[in-house]
């Protein structure tokens, strides 16, 4: 009944189904883990944004890698902006997704160390090579507050660190690179400025990270799992349909064979009857009963008694003597 499952077509189909099921289950768990990470990140962002600001020197130091648990922590720093060593970071977007640049200004602390401050977004110059118009940083000794972020790398940001850029332009915010350029000890990571707010709204402050939406990862996970469950169900449906179609074809073939049998029997009977009539009849057959081929014909027969002669040469008593020919 199910021998068709051993055919090449069904073996391939079954193998494909067996591969798809675990693959879809794994894709579902992949999306589920992304959902979990997104939920955990949202919780971390919310907690760190609510935390009280602390001095930046308590959270980082030169050569320090900022751990994820300290991302978005509010930190304070007091010092003087070194606007002469200011640079801009290319290919950055604002809240409206306009492409421009971030302004990165070193803040020299009282102890001589430096913390990098991302003052916000400005439009890029028309030719992309010229230095853009950047509002000046506050002069004198200032205290700033910002969200602590880790150094950017190509791996973490997906942005390629291009070389040969125009003067005072960079691709990544990286404390090690800036320490080499400045010739100073630079704290690991940087601050996204939140206070004081720039006069006139420029540079545009970097907005708080989104921590309300969780994305569609959970929906994608459920979708993949439903697909995985649907594969065996679909396979069973196809198998049953194939069996039903084959049984229907077999019944149709059997019915067609039954319809052909009476005609074949009638033909065979007719041939048999005809053979008995034609071959078995002895009427008019001159050879029947006479193996020598001689037969009796009423029209040409003669009386055998006339030819019967006794052993002694005399005619048999019961025989009729032949008649003498008539005289002419």
Image (cartoon, rainbow, N blue to C red):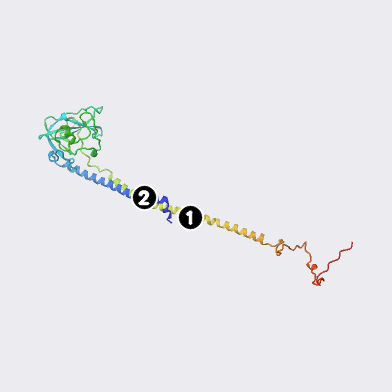
Q: Say if 295 sits above or below 116 in the image.
A: below
Point out residue 225 in the picture as x, y percentages from the top left corner: 31, 49
- Report the disc number at residue 262: none
The reply, left or right, for residue 6 in relation to residue 195 is right
Q: Earlier in the sequence, mark 1 or mark 2?
A: 2
Image point (35%, 51%), residue name = 18
The reply, left or right, for residue 32 in relation to residue 64 is right
Locate residue 165: give its quadrant.
Answer: top left
- SS class of the residue under badge 2? helix
Point out residue 174 in the picture as x, y percentages from the top left corner: 19, 36
Image point (42%, 50%), residue name = 8
The reply, left or right, for residue 121 in relation to residue 223 is left
Point out residue 209 in the picture as x, y percentages from the top left corner: 21, 39
Point out residue 305 in the picture as x, y percentages from the top left corner: 79, 68
Q: Say if 103 sits above or below 306 in the image.
A: above
Total labels drawn:
2
| Between 301 and 233, the one nearer to me in the picture | 301
How dense is the environment of label 1, judged by Cα within 10 Å: few (below 14), some, or many (20 and up)?
Answer: few
| Between 200 and 284, the one nearer to me in the picture | 284
| Between 239 and 47, the one nearer to me in the picture | 239
Quadrant holding the C terminus: bottom right
Quadrant holding the N terminus: bottom left
- Report the disc number at residue 250: 1
Residue at which label 2 appears: 17
- SS class of the residue under badge 1? helix
């Amino acid at each position: 009944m199910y021998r068709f499952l051993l055919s090449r077509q069904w073996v391939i189909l079954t193998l494909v189904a067996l591969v798809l099921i675990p693959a879809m289950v794994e894709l579902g768990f992949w999306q589920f883990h992304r959902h979990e990470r997104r939920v955990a990140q949202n919780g971390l962002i919310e907690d760190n944004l609510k935390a009280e600001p602390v001095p930046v020197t308590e959270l980082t130091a030169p050569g320090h890698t900022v751990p994820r648990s300290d991302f978005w922590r509010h930190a304070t720093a007091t010092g003087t902006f070194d606007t002469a060593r200011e640079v801009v970071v290319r290919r950055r977007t604002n809240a409206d997704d306009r492409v421009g640049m971030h302004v990165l200004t070193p803040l020299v602390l009282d102890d001589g160390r430096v913390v990098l401050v991302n003052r916000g977004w400005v439009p890029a110059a028309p030719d992309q090579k010229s230095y853009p118009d950047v509002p000046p940083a506050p002069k004198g000794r200032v205290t700033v507050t910002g969200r602590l972020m880790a150094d950017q790398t190509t791996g973490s940001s997906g942005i390629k660190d291009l070389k040969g850029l125009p003067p005072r332009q960079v691709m990544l915010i990286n404390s090690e690179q800036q320490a080499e350029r400045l010739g100073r000890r630079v704290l690991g990571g940087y601050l996204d400025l939140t206070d004081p707010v720039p006069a006139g709204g420029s540079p545009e402050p970097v907005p708080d990270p989104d921590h309300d939406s969780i994305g569609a990862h959970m929906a994608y996970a459920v979708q993949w799992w439903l697909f995985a469950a649907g594969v065996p169900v679909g396979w069973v449906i196809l198998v049953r349909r194939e069996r039903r179609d084959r049984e229907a074809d077999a019944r149709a073939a059997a019915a067609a064979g039954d319809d052909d049998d009476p005609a074949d029997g009638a033909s065979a009977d007719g041939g048999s009857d005809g053979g008995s009539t034609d071959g078995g009849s002895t009427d008019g057959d001159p050879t029947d009963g006479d193996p020598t081929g001689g037969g009796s014909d009423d029209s040409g027969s003669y009386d055998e008694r006339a030819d019967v002669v006794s052993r002694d040469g005399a005619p048999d008593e019961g025989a009729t003597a032949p008649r003498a020919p008539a005289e002419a």
